Image (tube, grey):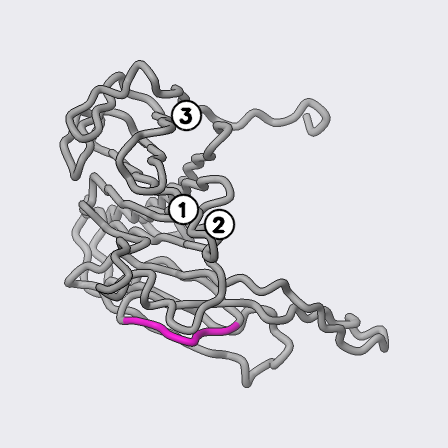
Amino acid sequence: DDAASTFARITTTSYQELPVTYTRDILFVKNGFVVVKDRAKFDATLKVRVGPCYQARDLGPQCGPHWFNTYVEELYCTGLGLGRGVQSFFNPPWDLLVYFSPRPDRSHTVSDSYAENPYRQMPIRLRQVWAGMTRPGQEITFTSVLLPHAPMLAPGELLQPPVEKNLTPHIEVAHDDEQVTVVKVVTESDPTNRIRSEYWVCFNATGGLVQAGPFETDAQVAVLRLNHDGTRVEDRTMTGGAVLRFRDVDETAKARKTTLATPALPAYLK
């Protein structure tokens, strides 16, 4: 945990009583976005459909082949059978772009169970899926970016800005494989005045030094924040490792260092 971001790793062995170890890495850049990397390791030959799943209330006004714009207009609270009816709470307008890093062997599905229960909070299921026969020892990974943003009629412009606006995409994947992921994310807290920040994130599961995108690092996780036009590094954090270079500049000495540790149970719960 850091002042600017929080990283957590959740590992589940014998996932759903199957010979599968499922690991989810979650990076929360505070007041900005979330990057999730899911890793499924199979210890036997299985016929599977596997991948991350996110629940949503509403979709639109645009969706793409591997991204979906979502929002929650209202939250419903039932009376739990006590004769209080159903209450609706207005949710302040703000959208969430759910972006799946595209891979050639992945498909994307949307299922809507609204008709089964109109008062279900999140009836829409968004999934990226790998389907096939696994091999013992095989690992399959998935990378997702969850980017909150102000409501807009054409959210696709966040990923493919019109040429005349001279803007860069809000999400760009520089490298993504089973071991290393490098992604650039641009946040915009005030679209009217174009108050923007550019972030670069690196996930490194190799245990050693890697070169990917603009990074050269042996950190397990590295996060850099640049100024609004992406020309100057303003903040750096690295988890583990001893080397952090970005665009051929050594940022190691200036970076805040964190380490992964098992959460401690609070004393009052012991």
Give the CA distance from mark 3 to mark 1.
30 Å
Q: Is residue 266 left or right of residue 167?
A: right
Q: Quick one: which residue is furthest to the right in this view?
A: 83
Label 1 sits on a secondary structure element that is strand
Q: Is residue 236 visible?
A: yes
| Nearer the observer, 119 or 154 | 154
Task: Identify the image quadrant of residue 231.
Answer: top left
Horizontal relation, residue 71 to residue 157: left or right: right
Circle on res. 260: 3
Q: Is residue 261 above or below residue 109?
A: above
Residue at the spot of label 1? 196
For label 1, count other residues whose C-alpha is less than 10 Å away and answer few (under 14), some (14-19) or many (20+).
some
Please, is residue 153 above or below residue 216 in the view? below
Q: Residue at x 46, y 78 (%)?
A: 112
- Coordinates of residue 215 in the picture (x, y in percent): 20, 32
Which residue has dot 2 on it?
189
